[in-house]
Amino acid sequence: MRTAKLLASVVLAIGTAGCLSFVEVSVETPIKPKLDASKFARVYVAGFIAGGSEDVDTNLETVRLLRSQLKNKSSLRVIEADVQPLADMAVKAAGLAPGPAAPGAAPGDAPKLAIRDERDMLPYEKIFADKEYWKGVGEEYQGALIVTGSVIFVPYQRSGYVQTEQEVYDSFGRRSVVPVRTYMDRKGFILKPKFLFIDGKTGETLYSETYREEILYNTEQSTPALSSYFELMDRLLPSFLSTLSSQTIKGTRVLLR
Amino acid sequence: MPTWKKVIAWATVGVAISATAAGAGDRKEARNQVEFGIRVASQGLWREATYRWERAVELDPTYAAAYNNLAIAYETVGEFQKAKQAYEKAIELDPKSIYIKQNFDLFKEINDRANRQAPR
């Protein structure tokens, strides 16, 4: 220990004296926002067309989560208003008949859309190209930046070989950990959100980004769908936020003499 | 050897010596600039460091370390295009340096992230 400390101080002393050919420095690299939102003072998260699991209300959960994140981590003022009746509008835009009402749904509730994957979602996405509709929404909120899109959150199962670590003891009783490949049935969720940023003054889509995240657990493990949803959203939030705000990435680089 | 030939020969030698001396002087000055740049960069003064390393590569355009440092300085101020060019020049001049390669790999990761999807 003492030798290690001595060595470290010798290296430091040599480095300080300028004898080393390199110097490691901490750097902060700024990344510009993906979208120039400087002309907007306010942002309105209008709601999402949701599909997949019925265990989580992905529309409202996504609206709540994005609003709170934007409030804390962007310079835009977040408009706290009711979400748009997107499911209704999407059905009209798609020219389709609404699906059967959800069990226990009251008259006037949003229609239940039978969306399991991107292919099912496609006809409903026509609503995002309806500039007049979004211009109308924008007028209601003084031309704010509108965040909308679609969220698919579906249960998922996969079987296959998984590498795990296993403790083994040799004939002398010495412990070691070895990688073991085991065949396992696993289940989890896939989250596929598509975020659109629409100019509330013109109704035009300024930027859109699609993500795909998945999580798998052992079949014996019981994880609530809502926890999985938040875990998956946590992974993509930094990228979502970097659309509107600049970020700095901390790291180290080596300067040379 | 005729006299005029001797004069030319000596003149050539003289020019070569003075050019070498000037080259050596520039290289020494470039090293001083790099050293000063490292000192100020360690204090977070990246703009000053950039100026020093730009001067260093002007004085000695074969100085790979100066290009490497310059690339890092450009990174810290968000000048990604210039950083990329400086890294590429550093690697061209010293293709064996693992430090330059490592710095460039880290930069590329960030650069790719920044350019992952261009706004439409």
Image: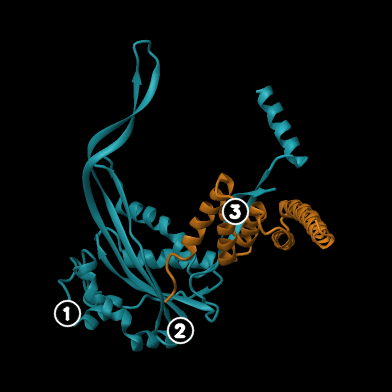
Disc 2/disc 1 C-alpha distance (Å): 29 Å
Disc 3/disc 1 C-alpha distance (Å): 64 Å
Q: Give me the residue at 44% from left, 71% from top.
A: B118
Front residue of B90/B4: it is B4
Q: Give me the residue at 63% from left, 64% from top.
A: B77
Which mark sits nearer the N-terminus, 2 or 1? 1
Say which of marks 3 and 1 sits in front: 3
Chain under callout 2: A
Chain for colour orange: B
Viewed as shown, does residue A12 lie left or right of A192? right
Numbered disc 3: secondary structure:
helix
Q: Colour of chain A?
A: cyan
Viewed as shown, does residue A15 lie left or right of A148? right
Viewed as shown, does residue A241 lie left or right of B33? left
Image location of residue A92, percent across then percent down: 22, 83
**Which residue reaches farthest front?**
B2
For label 3, the residue is: B93
